[in-house]
Image (cartoon, rainbow, N blue to C red):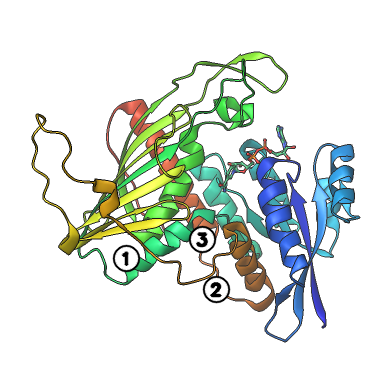
Amino acid sequence: MERTSIGIILNGVTGRMGYRQHLVRSLLAIREQGGLPARDGSRIWPELTLVGRNEARLAEIAARHGLDSYTTDLDAALANDAHRIYFDAQVTAQREKAIRAAIEAGKHVYTEKPLAEGLTGSLELARLAAARGVKNGVVQDKLFLPGLRKLKRLVDGGFFGRILSVRGEFGYWVFEGDWQDAQRPSWNYRAEDGGGITVDMFPHWHYVLEQIFGPVTAVTAVTATHVPERVDENGVTYRATADDAAYGIFELAGGIIAQINSSWAVRVYRDELVEFQVDGTHGSAVAGLRECRIQHRGATPMPVWNPDLPVTEPFRAQWQTVPDNADYDNGFKVQWESFLRHVVDDEPFPWDFMAGARGVQLAEAGLRSAREGRRITVEEIAR
Ligand SMILES: NC(=O)c1ccc[n+]([C@@H]2O[C@H](COP(=O)([O-])OP(=O)(O)OC[C@H]3O[C@@H](n4cnc5c(N)ncnc54)[C@H](O)[C@@H]3O)[C@@H](O)[C@H]2O)c1
């Protein structure tokens, strides 16, 4: 079958996200399935060029996956007209200037979140991309997870009646790095390197809340650095200058209150690493990454508060599992397919730089709320 080859520069491919989710689970997986059907009957075929700082590591990854194009010279890769898309999964602090160069080189740009470290930089990138006429997108992978897709289906189907509140619990224990290695890179714990859980997770919460429940209108947050000292990849002790927990209350249009705890200093007593409980007048749901459980108003028990008695109801057993009713592919891959169709066939792609900028805006507002000890209104950004 005829191929429509599309050259993609992958920057940050030696990192956790760049390698596992974007290269292996998305783009190589698309090639393994024979490409992606295009409107003209051909197959969209990603031609990959790996970019990074360490040539030996790039060569090793390329060899492992039968690829032959890699370089440490981003400018040279951007100067090549065969490359139509620039993708960025570098550490956050390196992103803005690389994306700016890619836009100036006329590339369509797709990127990990957060789009940039600050709102001003994010909006500048959105403006530059619009002015240069390049297509642009930001990863919003959680929207494509089975648990959240089932949750969205419940909202769309009117299951909840009037939605009252959302409570989210995200996190797990990230080891300090002394007696066991830390399972996240050390830059995440240094503010000066673009780290911090608010900057990392609020962009996710922003699109989850906005696209499933409604726009965020205000935020109140408390942040903390619970573990002040950690040990890095080289065994060197460093001071954690970034927040490792953020306790946020988000007010949504329509009066829904969402409260989400994000922490790298919490031990998991949950079924999944993130869970959202949604309560509505007609029913409630608890959604994780994969599963979603519901309780309808007609099946709601009537607990009576009496601490003198043992628990009388098997509360967890009273919930029903929402069936898949669909095949769920890897969320990063599904969004990549959408972006490729957007570039090749001009299909709609709502998760653009402006959407990414709104996520960064919420992170900034959250940090400001914590710093100033007050509620911050989230203003609508004019296009
Ligand atoms: N969508 C998600 O769920 C999700 C999850 C985790 C991280 N992320 C985002 O992905 C990006 C990468 O995160 P990661 O966890 O893969 O990080 P990582 O540390 O594993 O990888 C970072 C990559 O950036 C490169 N890099 C370029 N300049 C660098 C510099 N000066 N210092 C250090 N590394 C540099 C590294 O070589 C590596 O390829 C971040 O922006 C992060 O916010 C997204």
Inter-mark Cα distance, 3 to 2: 16 Å
Residue 335 versus residue 37 in the image, above or below = above
Q: Is residue 200 visible?
A: yes
In the image, ligand 1 is in what quadrant? top right
Whether label 3 lies within 8 Å of ligand 1 gets the answer: no
**Spot occupied by residue 93 in the image (x, y as percentages of width and height):** 63, 36
- The residue sitting at 55% across, 39% down in the picture is 117
Inter-mark Cα distance, 2 to 1: 22 Å
Which residue carries the number 1 mark?
A: 155
Which residue carries the number 2 mark?
A: 348
**Mark 1 element type:** helix
**Spot occupied by residue 221 in the image (x, y as percentages of width and height):** 33, 34
- The residue sitting at 55% across, 56% down in the picture is 353
Q: Mark 3: give few (<14), some (14-19) or many (20+) Cα within 10 Å.
A: some
Residue 38: quarter of image: bottom right
Please report whichever mark, 3 or 1, sits nearer to the chain's N-terminal start: 3
Which residue carries the number 3 mark?
A: 144
**Mark 2 element type:** loop
Q: Quadrant of the C terminus?
A: bottom left
Relative to 172, is 25 on the left or the right?
right
Please report whichever mark, 2 or 1, sits nearer to the chain's N-terminal start: 1
Q: Is residue 381 visible?
A: no
